[in-house]
Image (cartoon, grey):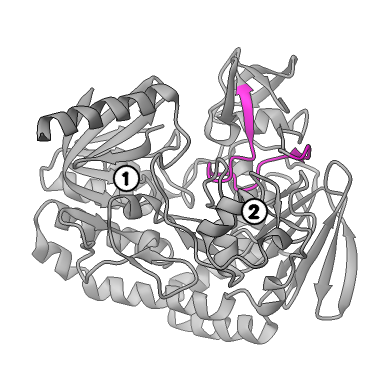
Amino acid sequence: MSASVRLQVNGQPVDVPDGATVAAAVAHWTLHFRTSVSGEARAPLCGMGVCFECRVRIDGVAHQRACMTPARDGMQVDSHD
Amino acid sequence: MTERYDVLVVGAGPAGLAAAGTAAAHGARVGLLDAQPRAGGQVWRHDVRKNAPRAAREAIAALHGVTLLAQHSVIASEDGALRVEIPQGSTLLTYGALVLATGARELLLPFPGWTLPGVSGAGGLQALTKQGWPVAGKRVVVAGSGPLLLAAAATLRAHGAKLVGIHEQASAESVHAFARQLLHWPARATQAALLRAKLAGVPYRFGSVVRQAHGEDALRLVEIDGAHGTSLVDCDLLAVGYGLVPNVELAQLLGCALDHGHPHPHVQVDELLRTSVPAILAAGEACGIGGLAVARIEGAIAGHMAAGHQDDARALLPERDRARRFGALLARHFAPGARVHALATPQTLICRCEDVPLGALDGYADARDAKLATRCGMGACQGRICGTALAELGRFPRGAGRPPLFPARLATLAGLALSSSDASRSST
């Protein structure tokens, strides 16, 4: 349970515990996950994959729900596309 | 690719785990799928800081002969099979019997400032925190309604958050009446006492509502309307949720009748949890909010039924009926009041996907008209947030969903189109 994984969020390294989500990793650097259609910064609301406010780009794939995605070593995550 | 199961269970929370374990114990070949990476559902969600509760570990350990299909998200239904998206692509699952244990989501209601980063659901922040969201040292206000607020607050505190206060919208009279009823539910009373002990020193206010969240790019402070007037409270995070609503989207897609007798529909089932569609059962929160005990018993009932053991299912009914009465008690004492329904102003965004303010919906009498004219409910969440909120506010019921159940990759949708055109060819 003490193991951790290292990933990159907007080019910055972040370590999170094994079992943590990409959402947790992003939150270490920023609460600006996505930009809404009218230009507002948004962050996760529901935490369970329903609201889609936590969408980020993971390893080049856009619109991934950060709260549903386990953090893995070497992942490249980009928020506020 | 097509996989076949005697019994397929959708949702690996307490109800689904019980259903899968029970059906497998009768010798059925069982698949248990969940969109999340781990079993446990919401209430038993994995916590990176500590071991799962014993009941959860036991339920997961008891899954002999069950194939756990994690990160499987149901997208559509195709002639008695489910089209499921997985990280590697998509798959088609067929079944002899299907158990819908799709659980519940949080009731999230609009108020000025609710779109600011730093504002989340109460169960929402609890879920995020369990999976590593950094809350240590953060000042958190917990608000909304129901016992979930205490459970969320306890998790937050265990992860190092500084709890500024817990604000329950229900009146002191209502909460105290509920507490008196707890005497009839010793296990629940013990659980509540343990939670209160974990939250020693944290103010717990009744008749208290967060009216507004303030901040530029992120939350800075909240305005609270309490029993003694209005106050401004500095905080880093606000966790606010108004209870739970059943997830009925898959049931609806499969043609199962819903009970619309509430602001939020639930799956209609008979005494033995059969839906209106043959070979499809439903259990737990999807059939109406009842809590953990209901979910576990109904899961077992559905598991017996799915495996064809009606007598075993029937033997559990008295226990189920008693557990269901607790759910009714919760609904009665914690239902959001008129003050909560009046929080959103015409400028408050109601549809967070398409940024549609509440005022833009004036004059529309149903979800479809509103959607066509304003795009409200047309975004990625497919109206799960705004449609549910509008139903709660008494505007109009949520519109019927359509496939895909969740936004899906093009390849998944192509698989869907391919197999349905195959089906239409073979039927002509």
Question: Residue B121 has which mark?
Answer: 2
Question: Within the image, what quadrant is residue B420 found in?
Answer: top left
The reply, left or right, for residue B206 in relation to residue B15 is right
| Residue B221 visible | yes
Q: Toward the viewer: B127 or B51?
A: B127
The reply, left or right, for residue A52 in relation to residue B279 is right
- Residue under the point 56% across and 53% down: B371
Which part of the image, by quadrant, shows the N terminus of chain B?
A: top left
Q: Toward the viewer: B339 or B347?
A: B347
Q: Residues within 10 Å of mark 2 (few under 14, many from 20)?
A: many
Q: Which residues are magenta?
A: A38-57
User: Main SS of the magenta segment?
Assistant: loop
Q: Relative to B149, does residue B331 appear above or below in the rendering?
A: below
Q: Is residue A50 magenta?
A: yes
Q: Quick one: SS at disc 1?
A: strand
In this rendering, the count of numbered labels is 2
- Residue under the point 79% across and 59% down: B347
- Indicate the chain on which mark 1 is placed: B
State how far apart marks 2 and 1 are (Cα): 24 Å
